[in-house]
Image (tube, rainbow, N blue to C red):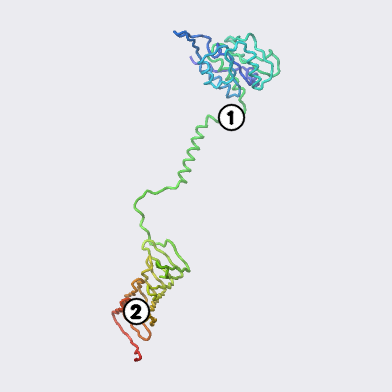
Amino acid sequence: MAAPALTFPPELLLAAQGVRAAIFDVDGVMTDGGILLSDEGEMLKRFNILDGLGLKLLQRGGITPIVITGRDSKPLRRRLDALGVTHVHYRTEDKRPAAEKTLAALGIDAPLRLPGGAGQRAHRGAQCRPLRHAGGGRPRRGPRVLRPAAGGFGPLRAVAGGLRVSAQRGFGRAWDRVSIYLPVILMGLLALGTYWLARNTPTFSSPGTPRAPTHEPDYFLRNFSVKSFDAAGRLKNEIHGAEARHYPDTDTTEIDNPRIRSYNQKGALTVATAKRALSNGDGTEVQLMGDAVVTRTSFDAAGKPQEPMEIRGEFLHAFMDTEQVRSNQPVRLSRGGDVFVGDSMVYDNLDRVLVLEGRVRGTLQARPGP
């Protein structure tokens, strides 16, 4: 059979407004008054979980539960500890001094008179009036004594429910309503946090096939000068230009209006200029395009400088380390008064070999005799 819904008369709710503490006995209040004896003679008592709920409701409503009992046992202590009741007096037959002492410790300073004897319990019909004002019907506020009906099957919870309903007003009631939706709100916040993390956490691509580089410059230089040195610290190459663009797919650098100076190990200087140049990664090969000019200075066996050699053409391919110049287009070579032209050329400065192909013409200026 379902338990009837809890209802409270208005005068009970009004009286509960000033309640700050609730004093309970154990036998007949938290128990049904019965005693169970084991074969070994051990005394057992039966507690009702609904009375435990009542004590929890009192604590939530800001009311301090106080237990004063003439008994003491390990099950009783475990039960009260589990319910969080800290103000307990065990083996106390005279309950008035213990009650007054506890109320004074809680800061409740008012005379206390228990109706009837110390161990008196109201009968079941008293559930509608479990609160009795100290001193009878005097209107002033003071400590109130909670005396639920005996039986232990719900009266304590019923009284505590009435106090909780009347004591929690305003914010307390609003919090009860909000707490119903609190799990949904927390789940929503967790979902929003997860979405934010997913959007803002950097992703790391799995190691796979690297994407092939495209023929687009990854950096550029303007009005620049780049110098390289050998292991001994001597200047090896020097490149000036209006603008340079580096292409990672071919590791080449395209230079506008280049001026390149290169020194070999003997200190001979090679100067190259053009409208545009294309250099490899280490600068050992340079393709000159548009009004290309390569000027080479050298020394004779005695160490005296010779007349520089000049090579001109629309396209010249210079190899700085091997001191070679190649071209598949018409070129013009000159040294002093000597001039040679041809449709293509291969010049090796180290071996002193010049190869001209196609229509070749040359002019040699006569040297004065010894």
**Amino acid on which the number 2 mark rests in the picture:** Val
How much space separates mark 1 and mark 2, taking CA atoms?
97 Å
Q: Residues within 10 Å of mark 1 (few under 14, many from 20)?
A: few
- Quarter of the image holding residue 26? top right
- Per the rendering, the mark at residue 331 is 2
- Along the viewing direction, whichever of 29 and 302 lies nearer the viewer: 302
Q: Nearer the viewer, mark 1 or mark 2?
A: 2
Report x, y in % for residue 119: 60, 9
Q: Residues within 10 Å of mark 2 (few under 14, many from 20)?
A: many
Please report the residue visible at 35 percent of the width from the left and 85 percent of the height from the top.
Answer: 338
Please report the residue visible at 35 percent of the width from the left and 89 percent of the height from the top.
Answer: 367
Residue 321 drawn above or below residue 117: below
- Label 1: state its secondary structure: helix
Quickly name the residue at label 1: 174
Q: Is residue 254 left or right of residue 30?
A: left
Indicate which disc, 1 or 2, sits on the residue closer to the N terminus: 1
Residue 306 drawn above or below residue 113: below
Residue 217 drawn above or below residue 90: below
- Label 2: state its secondary structure: strand
- Along the viewing direction, whichever of 54 and 367 lies nearer the viewer: 367
